[in-house]
Image: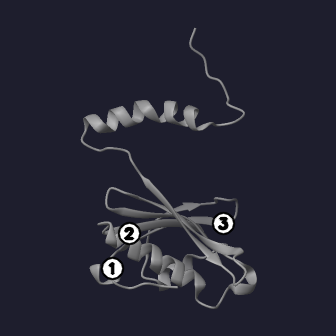
């Protein structure tokens, strides 16, 4: 008999099996679910990672999942450079827009300064805070720039 089972560990095979019905459904409507994940690492002189950006490219959109910079490196422009490099890579692959979500206790002002605009809010998530959803139209002029 069918039942619901909580998985203690989500394996790649389990995830693929769970995504399959949704993928088949969206394909029948002309949309192939095939996000291209990527990561940018912010390294110090010894090669250690001090932060970075994790995102994906899908349907002409850049999705920023994680942006992180070590506390002692903040305020030096590394976060901006990571986002701009992700945008440059996205434009080079044909992306025209980008989106990200962040929280009121994190960095909505940072993304606003980079040209992102709020398109949605989830109040009281986490309690007493707000989750913000932001988007930006990417311009082809980003394609030739490289940030390091």
Q: CA distance from mark 2 to mark 3?
A: 30 Å
* Above or below: residue 72 compared with residue 61: below
Which is closer to the viewer, label 2 or label 3?
2
Identify the residue under disc 3: 129
Question: Residue placed at 52% from the left, 83% from the top?
Answer: 81
Question: Residue placed at 43% from the left, 77% from the top?
Answer: 116
Identify the residue under disc 2: 90
- In this view of the protein, can residue 68 be seen by the observer? no
The front one of 54 and 120 is 54
- In this view of the protein, can residue 30 be seen by the observer? yes
Q: How far across and how far down the image is residue 40, in percent?
A: 55, 70
Q: Are marks 2 and 3 in contact (CB under 8 Å)?
A: no
Residue at the bottom extreme of this rendering: 76
Q: Quadrant of the N terminus?
A: top right
Q: Which mark is residue 143?
A: 1
**As drawn, is 134 to the left or to the right of 29?**
right
């Amino acid at each position: 008999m069918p039942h619901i089972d909580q998985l203690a560990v989500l394996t790649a095979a389990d995830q693929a099996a769970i995504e399959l019905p949704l993928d088949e459904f969206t394909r029948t409507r002309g949309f192939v679910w095939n996000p291209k994940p990527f990561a940018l690492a912010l390294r110090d002189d010894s090669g250690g990672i001090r932060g970075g950006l994790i995102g994906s490219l899908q349907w002409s959109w850049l999705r920023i999942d994680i942006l992180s910079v070590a506390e002692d490196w903040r305020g030096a422009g590394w976060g901006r450079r990571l986002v701009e490099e992700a945008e440059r890579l996205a434009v080079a692959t044909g992306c025209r827009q980008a989106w990200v979500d962040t929280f009121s206790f994190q960095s909505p002002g940072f993304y606003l300064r980079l040209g992102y605009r709020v398109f949605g809010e989830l109040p009281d998530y986490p309690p007493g805070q707000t989750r913000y959803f932001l988007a930006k139209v990417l311009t082809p002029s980003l394609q030739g720039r490289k940030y390091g």
